Structures are given as C-alpha cells and as structure tokens.
Image (cartoon, helix red, strand yellow):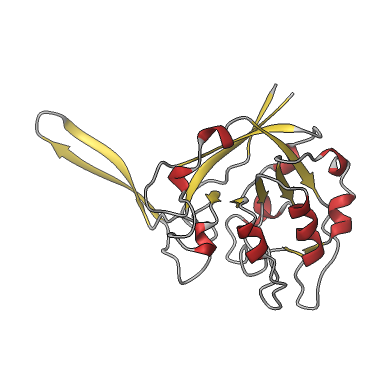
Amino acid sequence: MKIIDITGPLANGMWSYGEHFPKLNIKVITGTQEGFGEYSFTSFEGVHALSGTFLETPAHFLGYKNSYLINEVPLKKLFNIDCVVLNVEMNKVDNNGISYVTQGDLQACFNSSVIEKGDAIIVGKGWGDKMWFSKEHFPKSPYFTYEAFMWLLDKQPSIIGSDTSAWDNFSNPSGFFEKFYRQNVLMLAGCMNLKKVTEPRVKLTVLPLNVENSCASPCRAIIVQD
C-alpha cells in the first residue's frame, strides 16, 4: 500500500486568487503565562475558504441559501472513495500563451476507460508541483475546453479535482461552471503530487475543516494505491 499526500502546503508566499482574497501570513508568537512558563503558537492570518488545497460545495456558485455548506457534506462521501487520476500531457497553448486540456487529452490517459459513475476524477497537469509559490499560479493556470469538461461531467463523478486554480478560460469563458455546480459535484482544487499516482484506480480521502457557514474549506487530501 502506498499513501500519497496530494495536499499543497499552507505557507507564506504561496499562490492565491489575487487582491480580493486575504494574504496569508503565518507567524510564530511567543509569550509567558504565569503558572505555565514560556509558550509558543502559530498564528494563521489570512486563511480563507479557498486557501491552498480546498474542497468546495455548489454553494460557492448557487448561494448559501440554495445549496449545502461544507460542514454538511457526509463523511462517507469523502472517506476512502473510489478515484481515478488522469495525468494529462500538457502540449497545447492558446494565443495568450496559456495551456489547455482537450477532451482528447483526457481520453488519451491510459486509465480514462475505467471511470465509473460516482468516482472522484482528478486531473493532473503538473501545475501545482512547479507553481505553488508563483504569483502566476492562478492567472496563468491551464484550463479545460468546454468539450473536455462536459466529458468529465458526463461521467457523473462525485468530485472533480485538479492541480490547477483556474478551470475555465477567463479571458474567453466557455460557461461550463453553471452546469458543473447544478450537477451537484464537489470541487477539489489546488492539488499536488498527482504524477506519483500510477495505478488506474485508487482510493481518495478528503477531510475539510469542520467549519460552519462556509461553502468551502482548506482540506487534507490523501490517495491510497495498492
């Protein structure tokens, strides 16, 4: 059995979604307490729902009153679930110099034919591994074509994940997000180490924080393969 942590580290200088989101500032605080002595702890300033590797519910798009929140996702839907990791070859670039994934790229993966209804599908592009501490992680993130993402949705997955931070082409959006969220699929974004997954089918465990009144949460995501 091989355990693969596909979670990116929360660390100062890591990528973010830009100026509309708080800036992460992790710092060690020390002090003295009578009866205890010296103590230390770490402050996580600027952590938000979409920090690092995170799991997201449709409430992000549909609204909090129209969907369910992250602490309402049953653990049985997140623990030891069937998963297929598609590691694609990134060899297509648009006129803006940004890479994209086509339906053909997904189908060319050696294990694309073993996907079953209800699986988690995670698409690896090698992006998170090399760009975690880059300001270009989000604005230059590879994206899916409309046909590619519809192919994923047609598989009726429980979770769609990726090691990228932008899934649509924001300079020319194809508009697949509404169908994605209305299909009630969870989003797992900001993964790493997906190239280490070599088996056609694996098991995935995703553990978001038990936080109230949030559509998403940073999480720990782990893959187990035989």
- Left or right? Give the position of 13 relative to 151: left
Residue 84 position, x and y percent, is 75, 39
Q: Is residue 105 above or below residue 3?
A: below
Q: Quadrant of residue 119?
A: top right
Q: Is residue 212 above or below residue 134?
A: above
Q: Quadrant of residue 136?
A: bottom right
Q: Is residue 225 above or below residue 179?
A: above
Q: From this viewpoint, is residue 145 visible?
A: no
Q: Name the quarter where the N terminus is drawn.
A: top right
Residue 154 position, x and y percent, is 78, 53
Q: Which residue reaches farthest top?
A: 1
Q: Which residue reaches farthest front?
A: 66
- Left or right? Give the position of 126 relative to 54: right
Task: Name which residue lies at 42% across and 58% down.
Answer: 24
Q: Is residue 168 above or below residue 35?
A: below
Q: Name the quarter where the C terminus is drawn.
A: top right
Q: Quadrant of residue 20?
A: bottom left
Q: How many marks?
A: 0
Task: Name which residue lies at 72% across and 45% down.
Answer: 121
Q: From this viewpoint, is residue 108 visible?
A: yes
Residue 158 position, x and y percent, is 65, 44
Closer to the camera in the image, 99 or 120: 120
